[in-house]
Amino acid sequence: DGLKTELDASHAKSIDLESSLAAEREASAAKYSELEAEKTSIEAELQDRIESHNAEVESMRENLTNIETKLADAESQSVALKAEMERHIDGLKTELEASQAKSIDLESSLVAERDASAAKYS
């Protein structure tokens, strides 16, 4: 009788252990599934952030390219404007020199006429 009681107790303990192990296995599997879901969620969030960052970087690159293009255009216009202004200044200098030469010629003519007139009345 004592042996049978001991055997029954051992059998009951074994069943309890199996039941406890099965419960732990289920809890572990549930925790694993939960962690896998969290991992997938984090990976998706990271992927979204990476894609968003890459889009920002690409937008910045496009903006930089646009700015560089505008700067090159402005520099080109500046060079063209400077050349045009230099041509205009050269033209004005030529006109001034011609005007000064004409003025000198007129002055010389007036002096010559005055001298001729003075000689005539002397």
Image: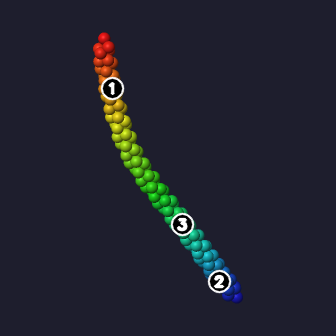
Q: Look at label 1 and name its amino acid.
A: Leu
* Mark 3 secondary-structure assignment: helix
On screen, residue 121 versus residue 15, left or right, reads: left
The percent coordinates of residue 43 (x first, y second) are 53, 68
Placement of the N terminus among the 4 image quadrants: bottom right
Q: Can you tell which mark lies on residue 48?
A: 3
Would residue 42 be found to the left or right of residue 112 on screen?
Answer: right
Q: Residues within 10 Å of mark 1 (few under 14, many from 20)?
A: few
The foreground one among 59 and 105 is: 105
Please state, as top left, top right, bottom left or bottom right, where the C terminus lies in the image.
Answer: top left
Q: Residue at x 64, y 78 (%)?
A: 23
The answer to whether residue 17 of the structure is visible from this angle is no
Which residue was labeled with disc 1?
106
Q: Quadrant of residue 104?
A: top left
Residue linked to disc 2: 15
In three-dimensional space, the C-alpha distance between marks 2 and 1, rounded to whole angstroms, equals 134 Å
